[in-house]
Amino acid sequence: MHNALFLKNKLFIALSVTLGAFPAISLATQAPLSDIEHLEVEGQRPGDHQQLGSAERLLGKQGVDFSAAGGMAALPVLNGMMGDRIKILVDGAEVSAACANQMNPPLSYVSASQIRSVSVVAGVSPVSLGGDNIAGVIKVSSLVPRFGQSESLQWDQGSLSAGWRSVSHSQTYGASASASSKHLSFEYRGAFEDAKSYRDGHGNKVTDTLFRAQNHSWLAAWQDEGQTLSLKLTHQYIPFEGFANQYMDMTDNKGYGAQLNYDRRLANEGEFSAQLNWHLVQHKMGFFTDEKPGKMPMETEGSDYSYQLAWRLPESDGDVWLWGHEFFNQRLDDTWPAVPGSMMMGPMDYVNIHDGQRRRAALYGEWQHNLSPRWWLSSGVRFEYVTTNTGEVQPYNQMPVMGMPNADAAAASAFNSSYRKQSDALLDATVLARYQGGENWQLELGLARKNRAPNLYERYSWGRGVMASTMVGWFGDGNGYVGEINLRPETAHTLSLAYSYAGEDMQFGASTWYSDIQDYIDVEVIGSFTRGGADGSRNLLQFTNLDARLYGANLSADYRLSEGQSGRWSIEAEATALRGERKDGSEPLYQIKPLETRLALAHRLGDWQTALAWQWVATKDEVDSRRLENTTNSYSLLNLESRVSWQSLTLTLALNNLLDHYYQLPLGGVSVADYRNNKDEGFAQLAGAGRSLELTATYRF
């Protein structure tokens, strides 16, 4: 798609989304239909690092939805599903969220300026891309070894970037440097951002949305004629990050990672690859700003160890076999230190997760076959064995609370006496069929069975008191959550159909998909409580299995109006509809985005690109009553963005929400921060950002 830097390509994602196979799309060009495999968003072309900020800013421009959280920690949403239902791989490695609120999800460890490309495959994703997911796979590529032609090490390229956003007075910076020879490659990429709380369309501060973050990555690689060996090191430091829709904030997050890759070329153009990954997270929650006052510490330490072995074995008739073995090990300790002098939060530490373990071992095989010049088929099977366990826990104390029974003490006793070790066998299977009808159109059909086992918090969060339960949950709804040890894995059966056309002046796509999910991990109401104020009532929810269905349709078109001395003018349009519901009474699922349409006028003249886009989102009135989800009104936004490159300098100017409209985020959850400051307002929906002037400059050398 043209001007993909500025506009979402939601339908094209949906097509790859549902089929795991769609045109490879970059910022500059679109691949021919015969090369259709999956959507690839090229975030940073070599030497071009104009994108700054969180990964959400880059992926959001390309059509991926996000559930609001902190400035660096929004959770992506594919086909109406978020969180651990999506498998996120950063340079092939998995990173688990080590937090009861998922404040440090995988995408928080990579900034937009560090991303080289992203593959988004939802629904029917090939088994070779990963298991333990039912919504799809987001595969991020940040550091890829690049070798030169010289025998001696020489400077390759570097860049410096800076940006500013008026709505949050944020400052963003990025830097990169690389050097290489014929056999050696070295690269560094780093990013820093400091932002205050943003303002809405009324000019009011959206409290507790400030943050500061930095991410760094280093790569060293060696190669000879038949093999490549590379080592990547990463570090993240976030001293504070506000979470407006959670009861607590993040007061410290340190991440350390190491990744070792080995690739070897085999006979007959075959390939073997091995990867070893390690990641450590030290995470603290608490309060750091008077925008959301409080006093309570929480400390979590988590680690991930994994390895992956993969073989790609082509045959003489053009068929390709993919074989692989993978192993993943997650460990987690989540402790809430006692607060000195507090009767409720002491005298002992609250142990939420003690020596939590989640291990996965996987085997897969995938076959790609050309049935005829027009028909292509891919099928695969993946088996995973997942085990989880945790040690004994303890509450703050065993005493009655304000004359009432101590719910947490009773829950801890029941939890410690239970059998906690669980195991699940997961079997995934996918079939993708593609028909090339002519030079410019294509039809694809996908069918998949996908599985996901419960995460540690879904199984082992045991507290039933109001304070303890409201510290758990990544949904931003203000409710309390309790785990269920005996949860079963989710099993999704997905059917999808997509049509795409690419002519000289027009591109068009349409897709539809349907997912039937058995044992969907949802919630049941087991109690209620009030936080005070006019409307401070919330529910106590326990994770449970039920059956659900999700389905949707997408349309997208790009029509070239003219192309000549004045440049290229085009109109781009898209529409997305989605629905998700429980099958026991057809009640809506949580955070299902309403109908959305986009219309844009785009212009390109040489190295100058401009786009004026209008976005309309319908009223959200299909809401989850169990989570007390709010409705939101329809709204429309007008966004203008322009970019020009001159020699080594690239300048970008954007005016987002040009008319300064006030709107509430359909996937934003409630503003707990506002409620804590004024309980009479109740749990209002989180507001979106008002008008924002954004400036970015990148210098390459």
Image (cartoon, grey):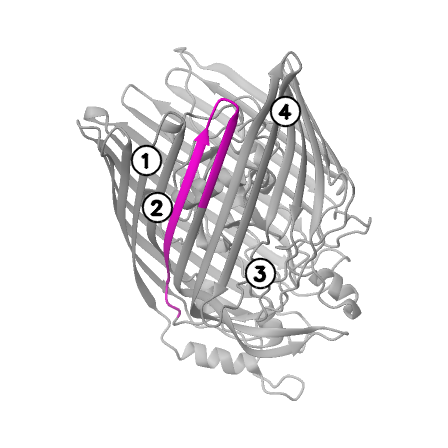
- CA–CA distance in space, label 4 to label 3: 36 Å
Label located before the other in sequence (1 or 2): 1
Label located before the other in sequence (4 or 3): 4
User: Which element carries disc 2, helix, strand or loop?
Assistant: strand
Task: Give the numbered dot on residue 475.
Answer: 3
Residue of label 4: 160
Question: What's drawn in magenta, residue-wise?
Answer: 487-511
Quadrant of residue 330 within the rendered picture? bottom left
- CA–CA distance in space, label 3 to label 2: 30 Å
**Residue 142: percent from left, percent from top:** 48, 33
Label located before the other in sequence (2 or 4): 4
Q: Amino acid at mark 4?
A: Leu
User: Which element carries disc 3, helix, strand or loop?
Assistant: loop
Q: Is residue 133 left or right of residue 688?
A: left
Q: Amino acid at mark 3?
A: Phe
Residue of label 1: 435
Task: Give the numbered dot on residue 446.
Answer: 2
Give me the residue at 63% from left, 37% from top: 599
- CA–CA distance in space, label 1 to label 3: 40 Å
Q: Amino acid at mark 1?
A: Tyr
